[in-house]
Image (tube, rainbow, N blue to C red):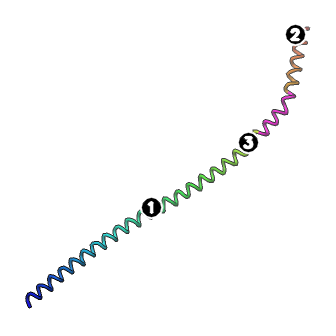
Amino acid sequence: MMSQVMVEETEQQDIQKHVNGRLSTARGIEREIEKLTEVFSKFATLVVDQGESLRVIDADVEAAALEVEDGQKYVAKTHSITKGNRGVIVKIFATVLVLAIILVTT
């Protein structure tokens, strides 16, 4: 009878050790899951921030493209105005040159 009680106590101690080991393992897994949750939460925040940065960059690129188009229109307009005035500038220069020659020779 005594040996049976000792065997039962030993079995209960073994079961208790096994249960405690499994409980410790489960708590360790729970801590690791909490750490993973935190990491994924931070990662999600970074992804959202990067998405916002990309939207800002995209808007800036679109604005720059519009500014470049406007600049190209102004350059083309200035070129056409300057090109149209070249004839007038040459005529004025020729007239001034003729007047200078007439004044110098007289």
The magenta span reads: 76-88
Give the residue type at disc 2: Val
Mark 1 lies on residue:
42
Quadrant of image for the N terminus: bottom left
Q: Secondary structure at mark 2?
A: helix
**In the image, residue 52 lies at what x, y percent?**
56, 57
Q: In the figure, 89 relative to 33: above or below?
A: above
Q: Which mark is residue 72?
A: 3
Q: Which mark is residue 73?
A: none
Q: In the figure, 57 relative to 93: above or below?
A: below
Residue 95 is left or right of residue 13, and the answer is right
Hey, which residue is sitting farthest left in the picture? 2
Report, in whole angstroms, how far the alpha carbon at label 3 lies from the one at label 2.
46 Å
Q: Earlier in the sequence, mark 3 or mark 1?
A: 1
Residue 5 falls inside the magenta stretch: no
Looking at the image, how many numbered discs can be counted on the residues?
A: 3
**In the image, residue 2 lies at what x, y percent?**
8, 88
Mark 2 lies on residue:
104
Residue 85, quarter of picture: top right
Residue nearer the viewer, 103 or 10: 10
**Mark in the foreground, 3 or 2:** 3
Q: Secondary structure at mark 3?
A: helix
Contact? badges 1 and 2 (CB < 8 Å): no
Graded by Cα atoms within 10 Å as few (under 14), some (14 to 19) or many (20 or more), the crowding at tag 2 reads: few
**Mark in the foreground, 1 or 2:** 1
Q: In the figure, 37 relative to 70: above or below?
A: below
Give the residue type at disc 1: Lys
**In the image, residue 87 lies at what x, y percent?**
87, 28
Q: In the figure, 105 relative to 17: above or below?
A: above
Q: Earlier in the sequence, mark 3 or mark 2?
A: 3
Residue 81 is left or right of residue 65, and the answer is right
Hey, which residue is sitting farthest bottom in the picture? 1
